[in-house]
Image (cartoon, helix red, strand yellow):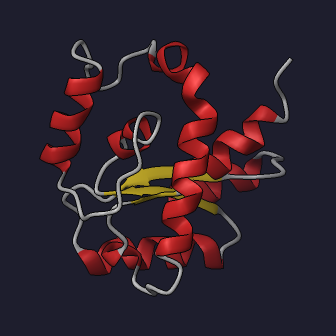
Amino acid sequence: MDAAKKYFKENDYDQIWFVFDKDEVKDQDFNNTINKLEKNGYKAIYSNPCFELWYLLHYDFYQASLSKEHCLKKLKEKIPEYEKNSEDMYNKLKDKMEIAIDNAKKLEELKKDIKSFSKKNPYTNVYKLVEELKKYER
């Protein structure tokens, strides 16, 4: 984060968003990272257990705890050709975007009383960045 602070201090930005997932990060490190980002005025956009949860929410609502492996398996059932860092995911999922946003908001509401970010599983707030970016759509 220190490198990011230096970089962003040298440039003029209205908003700075950090996007990451829980994966194998230790609970305490995950929680500390989010707290530190928010304390410094950055937007922390995260998924637990993994970013693929956001993709899954385009198809179905999940509220039971998931592992990264389970998310990947479920996603492959929906998109058999899925590969990490695939460049065409936006086009594949854009017609289901509102479903994902609604599902992520439902998860957020269900998990609102859980104070530890690492204990919110499944959880993603990627929808916040998506809603912000939609403001700039043409």
Quadrant of the rendering where the C terminus is positioned = top right
Quadrant of the image occupied by residue 6: bottom right
Q: Nearer the viewer, residue 11 or 69?
A: 69
Q: Is residue 118 above or below residue 105?
A: below
Residue 55 visible within the image: yes
Position of residue 105 in the picture relative to residue 135 (left or right): left
| Image coordinates for residue 60, horizontal then vertical, percent | 40, 41
Q: Is residue 134 above or below residue 88?
A: below
Q: Nearer the viewer, residue 131 or 10?
A: 131
Quadrant of the image occupied by residue 91: top right
The residue that appears at 41% across and 75% down in the rendered structure is: 117
The residue that appears at 21% across and 36% down in the rendered structure is: 74
| Image coordinates for residue 25, horizontal then vertical, percent | 24, 64
Q: Nearer the viewer, residue 4 or 46?
A: 46
Position of residue 15 in the picture relative to residue 36 (left or right): right
Residue 1 visible within the image: no
Q: How many marks?
A: 0
Position of residue 25 in the picture relative to residue 59 (left or right): left
Position of residue 17 in the picture relative to residue 12 (left or right): left
Q: Is residue 137 above or below residue 27?
A: above
The residue that appears at 56% across and 27% down in the rendered structure is: 96
Quadrant of the image occupied by residue 32: bottom left
Q: Nearer the viewer, residue 80 or 131?
A: 80
| Image coordinates for residue 67, horizontal then vertical, percent | 17, 55
| Image coordinates for residue 56, horizontal then vertical, percent | 37, 38
